[in-house]
Amino acid sequence: MRMHGEGLVVTIIIIEILGRKKTMALESFGTMAGFLLLFVCSTSEVTTLFLFLTRAFATGVFQTVYVYTPEVYPTSIRASALGLHTTASRIGALLTPFNAQVVFHSSDIAAVSFYAGSCLLLVISSLLLPIETKGKSMKDGPSVR
C-alpha cells in the first residue's frame, strides 16, 4: 500500500503555529537532515526509516508551498504562479533519475549531497520570502501585506 500524505498531518499542525515561511524552512531542513542521515545508516531498516521521514518532510514542503502560493499571488496570476511551481517540481523530477542512476553509481556522496544542497537552498529561500501570510485573509490585490 502506497501512502501519499505522510508529512501532511505534521504540516497541518505546524503551518498555523509557525507560519508558512518558517514551516517551509523547517520542513526543508528536515528533508536535508534526512538525506544527510543516510550517510550514517547501518542497516536497511534504518535506511528505510530515514527515507520515510525524508519523504514525509518533502511532502510537507510541497503542501506548504501549495498553501502559500495562492495566498501571496492575486487571482489574475495565481494559476500562472502555481504552474511555475509545478514546472519547477517537474524539472526536479526529471533530474532525479539521472542523479539516482548516473551520479549515484559514480559517487553516492555526490548524489545525496545534491539533494541536501538543494534543501539548504530551500531553507534559505524560504526564510528570505518577503511575505508571511499567517493569520491574513486572501485578497484580490497584488499581495497580502
Image: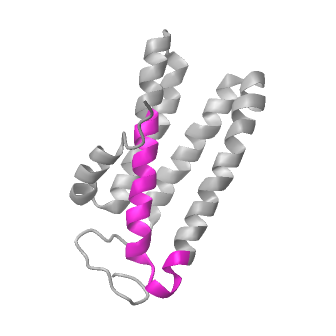
Can residue 139 be seen here?
yes
Nearer the observer, 1 or 23? 1
6 to 126, vertically: above or below: above
**In the rendered view, how is the structure colored?**
one colour
Percent of width and height locating residue 64:
39, 57
* Magenta-tinted stretch: 54-79
For the point 52% across and 46% down, the residue is: 120
The quarter of the image holding the C terminus is bottom left
Percent of width and height locating residue 34:
46, 31
For the point 46% across and 37% down, the residue is: 55
Q: Quadrant of residue 85?
A: bottom right
Q: Residue furthest front?
A: 1
Q: Is residue 69 magenta?
A: yes
- Direction from residue 42 to residue 83 in the image, left or right: right
- Direction from residue 64 to residue 87 in the image, left or right: right
For the point 23% across and 59% down, the residue is: 16
For the point 41% across and 55% down, the residue is: 63
Percent of width and height locating residue 106:
78, 24
